[in-house]
Image (cartoon, rainbow, N blue to C red):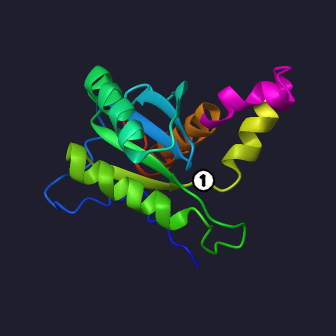
């Protein structure tokens, strides 16, 4: 059974801590496409950004380099696929490897978030917007990344409720 510890960064450098401030980039990893979403910790709302279409890891990382340079995120979030029963998915190990690469490359907190049903939810969202079938392909992965990032923000809200000060 796959376990995804809530809001625990996978970073090898244990001195890197989640700050819950600044911008966040989230990734829906796939062998051919990587969906990307962005958001701000302060606002807690995820937005779809782009889909990186590349088969080589080098090309994907080059595109991610540009995004990290542009957005200067404080945290990276990667969706971790699993079957409905929690068993590892065919892409689980590849997503974990991708997350470790992000960790080693950018030295930022990298959080794995359970992404079960994110693609199905993304497809349903696009259907509701009147985007169906093949028209969904260029948008599906970035909408899935948005759902993954929103899940991260929702978990923060549940574990660290906003404290009002007077």
Residue 41 is at least partly visible in this image: no
15 relative position to 116: left or right: left
Q: Position of residue 162 (x, y in %)?
A: 41, 37
Residue farthest to the left, as pictured: 15
Q: Which residue is mark 1?
A: 115
Residue at x 48%, y 61% (from the top left corner): 94
Residue 109 vs residue 59, the one in the foreground? 59
Q: How many marks?
A: 1
Residue at x 18%, y 52% (from the top left corner): 16
164 relative position to 157: left or right: left
Quadrant placement of the C terminus: top left
Q: Is residue 26 magenta?
A: no
- How crowded pointer 1 is (Cα within 10 Å; few <14, some 14-19, many 20+) is rated as many
Magenta span: predominant SS is helix
Residue at x 86%, y 20% (from the top left corner): 130
Q: Secondary structure at mark 1?
A: loop
Q: Position of residue 77 (x, y in %)?
A: 42, 45
Quadrant placement of the N terminus: bottom right
Is residue 104 placed above or below 150 in the rendered structure? below
Within the image, what quadrant is residue 23 found in? top left
Is residue 69 placed above or below 54 in the rendered structure? above
Residue 135 is at least partly visible in this image: yes
The magenta-colored residue range is 127-141
Q: Position of residue 127 (x, y in %)?
A: 85, 29
Residue at x 35%, y 27% (from the top left corner): 67
Is residue 155 placed above or below 74 in the rendered structure? below
Residue 47 vs residue 81, the one in the foreground? 81
């Amino acid at each position: 059974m796959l376990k995804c510890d809530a809001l625990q960064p996978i970073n090898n450098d244990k001195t890197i801590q989640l700050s819950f401030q600044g911008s966040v980039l989230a990734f829906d990893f796939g062998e051919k496409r990587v969906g990307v979403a962005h958001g701000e910790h302060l606002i807690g709302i995820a937005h779809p950004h782009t889909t990186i279409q590349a088969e080589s890891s080098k090309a994907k990382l080059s595109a991610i380099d540009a995004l990290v340079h542009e957005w200067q995120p404080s945290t990276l979030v990667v969706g971790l696929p699993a079957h409905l029963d929690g068993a590892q998915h065919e892409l689980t190990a590849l997503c974990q490897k991708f997350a470790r690469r992000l960790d080693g490359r950018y030295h930022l907190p990298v959080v794995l978030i359970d992404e079960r049903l994110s693609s199905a939810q993304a497809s349903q969202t696009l259907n509701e917007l009147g985007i169906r079938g093949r028209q969904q392909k260029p948008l599906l992965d970035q909408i899935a990344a948005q759902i993954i990032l929103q899940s991260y923000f929702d978990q923060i809200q549940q574990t660290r409720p906003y404290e009002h000060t007077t």
